[in-house]
Amino acid sequence: MTVLHLADEGEAADLAAFLSRLLHYDRSAAVRLQAAGTALAVFGRPPSFEVLAVRAVGLAKPYESGLDVTLDVTVSAGELLEGVAETAVTAAVPAAVTGPPWAGVLPPRGDWRPEAGLPAAGELRAMVGAAVGEFRRRTEELAPERRTRAELDRIGRDIWSRTVGDTGLPVRAVHAAQSLGFLRPTAGPAAAGGTRGAAQDAALFSSGAWLRLRTPYGSIAVRRAGSGGLGLSVR
């Protein structure tokens, strides 16, 4: 069994928290792992948000297993979580599984260009809070006979498909970042001293058909509306 040596206990704890949040939305969630050198990328897709979540994890030493110097495998998120040992700062990689369709289509590795117009992280959190409040108010105003799953889904689509200003980024991508722990407030010296402390705010990037909301704690990637089949990276 392949065992990954993580950079520190903080990386192990954050990886475990990310996997736990994915499993909250899908108990049978799968994740795709890609490791090269001292970097591990963990890709997941929480079904409620229709986005791709990416968690970067630092490794204590360059990945190498036998003659392989890179790792690319889709595994059960639950089994991977069971293999994370925070005190030992390791993660045992479980056996590969047949990946869901999204696992074969990932955002591009490079050519990401900065996009202007994204509010600061605090404003993004406030935006999500306001959207959640609107959803609650509108559903509570429904007559009992109209409070159906179809109507709740319609209200949700109306709210979460809105874009953040003129950026083209759907609000559901920001909601996903908040729910997965990527938009947490920066907490003074402790946050500034870790491996993710250099970046203090959220940023938006684009590459082909993709938009990527990046924070110090992870990224959310989403296809642009009406992008068709452009910009796919099948790996």
Image (cartoon, rainbow, N blue to C red):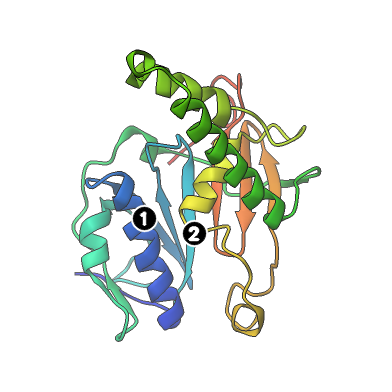
Vertical placement of residue 161 versus 8, above or below: above
Q: Are marks 1 and 2 in contact (CB under 8 Å)?
A: yes
Cα distance in 3D space between marks 1 and 2 = 8 Å
Amino acid type, residue under disc 2 in the picture: Gly
Relative depth, front residue between 141 and 229: 141
Pinpoint residue 146: horizontal percent, then vertical percent.
Answer: 38, 14
First of labels 1, 2 by sequence position: 1
- Residue occupied by mark 2: 181
Q: As drawn, which residue projects farthest toward the top?
A: 145
Which corner quadrant holds the N terminus?
bottom left
Pinpoint residue 210: horizontal percent, then vertical percent.
Answer: 61, 36
- Residue occupied by mark 1: 21
Which corner quadrant holds the C terminus?
top left
Give the residue at x 30% y 71%.
65
Amino acid type, residue under disc 1 in the picture: Arg
- Neighbour tally class for label 1: few under 14, some 14-19, many 20 plus, Cα within 10 Å: some
Judge whether residue 61 can be spotted in this image: no
Res. 66 image quadrant = bottom left
- Residue 107 left/right relative to 25: right
